[in-house]
Image (tube, rainbow, N blue to C red):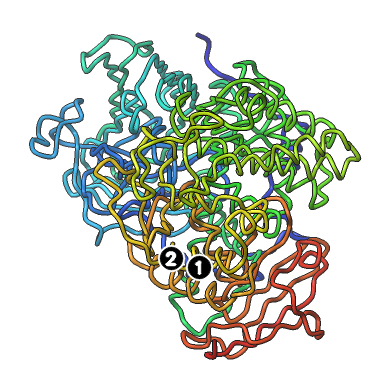
Amino acid sequence: MKQLKIKIGFAVVFAAVSLFTGCNPKKQATEEELPNLTQYVDPYIGTGFHGHVFLGANVPFGAVQLGPTNITQGWDWCSGYHYSDSTLIGFAHTHLSGTGIGDLGDILLMPVTGEYQIATGSPEKPEEGYVAFYNHDNEVVKPGYYAVEIPRYGVKAELTATERTGFHNYQFSAGTDAHVLINLVRGIGWDAPVESHMRLENDTLLTGYRFSKGWAEDQRIYFAAVFSKPVQSIVLFDDDKKQDGRELVAQKLKADLDFGALADGLVLVKVGISPVSSENALENLQIENPGWDFDAVVAEAGRKWNTELACVTAKSSDPEVLTKFYTALYHTMIAPSVFQDVNGEYRGSDKNIYRDTTFVNYTTLSLWDTYRAAHPMFTLLKPERVDDFVNTMVKIFEQQGELPVWHLMGNETYCMVGYSAVPVVVDAYLKGFKGFDAQRAYEAVKNTAMGDGRGVSYIKEKGYMPADSDVETVAKGLEYAISDACIALMAKDMGLEEDFRYFENRGQNYRHYYSPEVGFMRGRVSDTEWRTPFDPFKAQHRNDDFCEGNSWQYTWLVPQDVDGLVELMGGREKFLSRLDEFFVAEGDMGEHASNDITGLIGQYAHGNEPSHHIAYLYSLQGEPNKTADLVRKIMDEFYTTRPDGLIGNEDVGQMSAWYVLSAMGFYQVHPASGEFVFGSPALDEATIQLPGGKTFTVKALNNSAYNKYIKSKTLNGQAYTKSFITYQDLMKGGELVFEMTSER
């Protein structure tokens, strides 16, 4: 293989700048002009309990998530790091944040010196490998920066990042023999290597790739690593056995790079990554991170975070509320992640390489979670990114024949139920976003809903999935009905009357699962037979009619037609009575219930997404004070400033997006209606920066822990009596004022 050489021309630089600049304000703000909002972000929040959040250095929506990886594997280590742990096997360049399955953890670097083995070792016998220990007291974490001291090796490691590069600053003790290990074997969770490659191109450049199989079945990541000091020697290992030479292809590949005894003890490493090629990885690095000023890159990462966080100026008399709010906002901007090189190239779902500089391609699309709050939040707080999110999904449709379900690193995982990209696309269309081809987008949502896979053929034939045809049939059917109702709205707006009537009817399919005999959603075997035995409390993970929940929780999953559900339950009074019962009911879910069912208030489970809209149903039925009670309880008790401060899995920003919207005082119940239903604001004031220099301010007068009920509302000085505010009214700019009271 020839040595890599990259020529960077004006066109490439222009593409990089025009495609991938940050949060759009009218002008690029200077450091002095930006408020220091990162001071309110605590990246430790959610690293304990079941939060599964990423901890490390990254920039908003970046391809690189550079951070520490513990040796421990398991459900609570899906991000590679858990606050309860103190083991360290290196710093990987890709991590997930808030998923229920582990993957990534690619290109693991570890600074070492003295006595060690190339094997990973174990916490019980660290001398048999290179695993080390650390202490939280010797960590420093903030947006865009991570540092830790590694006592075993007497090394201080500092990390920062750009969109596509990781930047390591390793300070060894002066005069010690400095080594950097590169581990292409270890991944997180299900991830396992299939084939890896490394080549020392010259004494400061190492290139390679890592192909792996895990949750993403065919993941391919290429890299180029540049060192500030010359490599004195390299030893390559295949399955921990030494190999000769400077280049190796193997399944289980590692390298030991020796930099010798350094007078200053300093080794800097810059690593560019790419889904396409090592050449592209080096080009990404040369454009995004051309120099060696580590502190400047740290400052730029902080500036990017402050720029993105400045989409909302929040005020509260309670410092913890500001910490929770801005940390939640920070968590919503870890993903989706850029999946495209600076030259516009990316790897498609069909494994072909595409070059397209007309949009930014993304990955890590946890749509079953994020269609509920995160994507509606993006339309309000990050409108400059929405068109690219939709274009990404439409391109995936063109490559795989349907919209993404749960997309990761160019792979369709088919994880979770439904076709939940549909509400995201429809919501963007109905809110007036124009940066995508609306006709093509409609073709994507319609064709996705008209396929035959994953039980959709039963929906087209019967209107429901028979309970004996698959698992999780009620959950699937209810999710399909939500998306189908959204398609009906898009068809109606486009004047497609026949499609509108067809999908409007399919949006009513939730009725097939409601059993009047028991008053719950229930598995349906046939037109005349229900699933028996039936217990609304019971839940069996991946082995019943529901998905990570029970019948109590899924009975309310009709956000597209709340009035229809009210009618189905026998009218408003009976509906409200059942809702009251829901929030106090206690019963045994059984020993095989999903770990995701956490944060219980009765049967309400805030730790899992199907419950997220339910507290707001009271407001839609004229009982806003009950919504206020519940929303405040959830924000106060299920979101804290401790490492275990998330009551459940972050789910790639959804858990945090619920808090961001609710803290401002509203939540979009119907995923494509554009109607944000009022709750009870935790913030005293929130000013949203809108396109065109406009702002929308929400004020909560006399707000406190006791004054949690909205007594009255005004919009731009005029009395306002609706239980919601529309997206269109929000985007006009103006001021919404809540007068808060302690009186119910």
Where's residue 5, x and y in %? 59, 20
Identify the image quadrant of residue 438.
top right
From the image, tell me which residue sits under label 2: 581
Mark 1 is on which residue type?
Ser
Question: Mark 2 packing: few (<14 Cα in 10 Å), some, or many (20+)?
Answer: some
Secondary structure of the residue carrying tag 1 is helix
Mark 2 element type: helix
Marks 1 and 2 close (CB-CB < 8 Å): yes
Query: Is residue 433 something one can see in this rendering?
Result: yes
Residue under numbered circle 1: 577
Q: CA distance from mark 1 to mark 2?
A: 6 Å
Query: In the image shown, does 672 or 93 lie closer to the viewer?
Result: 672
Tell me which residue sits at (41%, 24%) in the image. Answer: 203
* Above or below, 204 relative to 581: above
Q: Is residue 136 left or right of residue 275?
A: left
Residue 139, picture quadrant: bottom left
Give how far across and how far down residue 91 sits, in percent: 35, 40
Residue situated in front as seen by the camera: 517 or 274: 517
Q: Position of residue 30 (x, y in %)?
A: 67, 64
Q: Residue furthest right?
A: 495
**In the rendered view, does 123 fall on the left or right side of 442?**
left
Image spot of residue 381 (x, y percent): 67, 59
Three-letter residue code for mark 2? Glu
Residue 508 lies left or right of residue 252; in this view the side is: right
Residue at the image position 15 percent from the left and 31 percent from the top:
121
